[in-house]
Image (cartoon, rainbow, N blue to C red):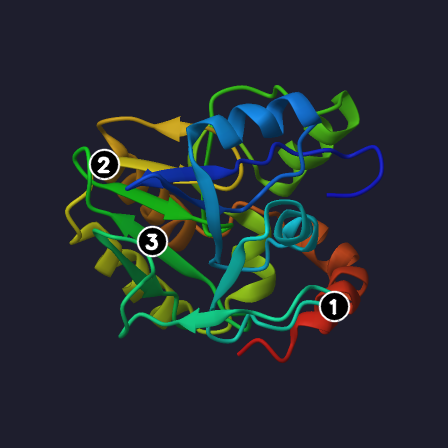
């Protein structure tokens, strides 16, 4: 997230017919890369939101393609996308479909992988925290102040800084609840097994009915600096 403020990151690896699709790739040490290759050929990255800091390395290292949600193709010096996808088109992944979040200033999608009871994969919009592993103690303190807590949550920063239409954003979450899934995994935090739909429903109610988890005072004192950082993504609409 920032120097001295690490946050957990997840790389989703989906194996299908001997090929691997990566969502949110994370650069790993050589021995871990070898373990990944032992699972199959890394065929593609599926970019579903702003996560992409290790995309260029991954494309170079594994010779895979980069397939992006429409509107997320440009990311600084990242490699050009091999292709794009949207919620109305087919994904380069069997038994999967995309749901684009509405009412946001930056493009993001959830992926429903219809296997093993259904797994909902998200970027920043939904996260689940079991513990504070991979966080430094200053990072734990800052994240708790920002509204991050145990269990399933709507991303506090995502909600405060990226949602521009509360009604449309909430409609997207409610659409997700109508999908056939039992489990969920975000690109931060942990895995929600079996009761993901109930956990997400409770998170939506807390964040939209009770108000944003991020305190207003914290939002106000950080808004200028964070908006400056987010300005580089403003073309991703």
Compare residues 117 and 212 and report the one nearer the observer: 117
Task: Between label 1 and label 2, give the one nearer the viewer.
Answer: 1
Question: Which residue corresponds to mark 2?
Answer: 198
Q: Is residue 33 above or below residue 51?
A: above
C-beta proximity under 8 Å, tags 3 and 2: no
Instruction: Pinpoint residue 39: horizontal percent, then vertical percent.
Output: 43, 29
Question: Which residue corresponds to mark 3?
Answer: 111
Instruction: Pinpoint residue 170: horizontal percent, then vertical percent.
Output: 33, 62
Instruction: Pinpoint residue 62: horizontal percent, then vertical percent.
Output: 59, 46
Q: Secondary structure at mark 3?
A: strand
Question: Which residue corresponds to mark 1?
Answer: 76
Q: Earlier in the sequence, mark 1 or mark 3?
A: 1
Q: Residue at x 55, y 48 (%)?
A: 156
Query: Distance from label 1 to label 2 (Cα)?
Result: 38 Å
C-beta proximity under 8 Å, tags 1 and 2: no
215 lies left or right of 203: right
81 lies left or right of 207: right
Query: Distance from label 3 to label 2 (Cα)?
Result: 18 Å
Compare residues 219 and 235 and report the one nearer the observer: 235
């Amino acid at each position: 997230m920032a120097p001295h403020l690490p946050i957990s990151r997840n790389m989703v690896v989906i194996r299908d017919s001997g090929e691997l699709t990566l969502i949110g790739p994370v650069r790993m040490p050589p021995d871990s890369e070898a373990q990944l290759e032992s699972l199959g050929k890394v065929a593609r990255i599926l970019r579903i939101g702003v996560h992409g800091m290790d995309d260029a390395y991954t494309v170079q290292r594994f010779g895979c393609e980069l397939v992006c949600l429409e509107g997320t193709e440009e990311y600084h010096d990242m490699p050009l996308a091999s292709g794009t996808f949207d919620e109305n088109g087919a994904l380069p992944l069997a038994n999967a479909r995309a749901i684009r979040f509405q009412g946001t200033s930056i493009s993001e999608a959830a992926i429903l992988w219809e296997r093993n009871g259904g797994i909902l994969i998200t970027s920043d919009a939904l996260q689940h925290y079991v513990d504070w592993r991979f966080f430094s103690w200053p990072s734990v303190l800052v994240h708790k102040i920002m509204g991050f807590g145990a269990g399933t949550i709507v991303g506090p920063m995502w909600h405060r800084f990226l949602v521009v239409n509360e009604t449309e954003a909430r409609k997207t979450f409610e659409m997700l609840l109508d999908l056939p899934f039992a489990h969920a995994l975000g690109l931060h935090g942990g895995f929600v097994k079996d009761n993901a739909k109930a956990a997400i429903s409770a998170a939506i109610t807390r964040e939209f009915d009770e108000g944003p988890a991020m305190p207003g005072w914290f939002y106000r004192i950080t808004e200028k600096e964070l908006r400056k950082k987010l300005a580089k993504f403003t073309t991703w609409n």
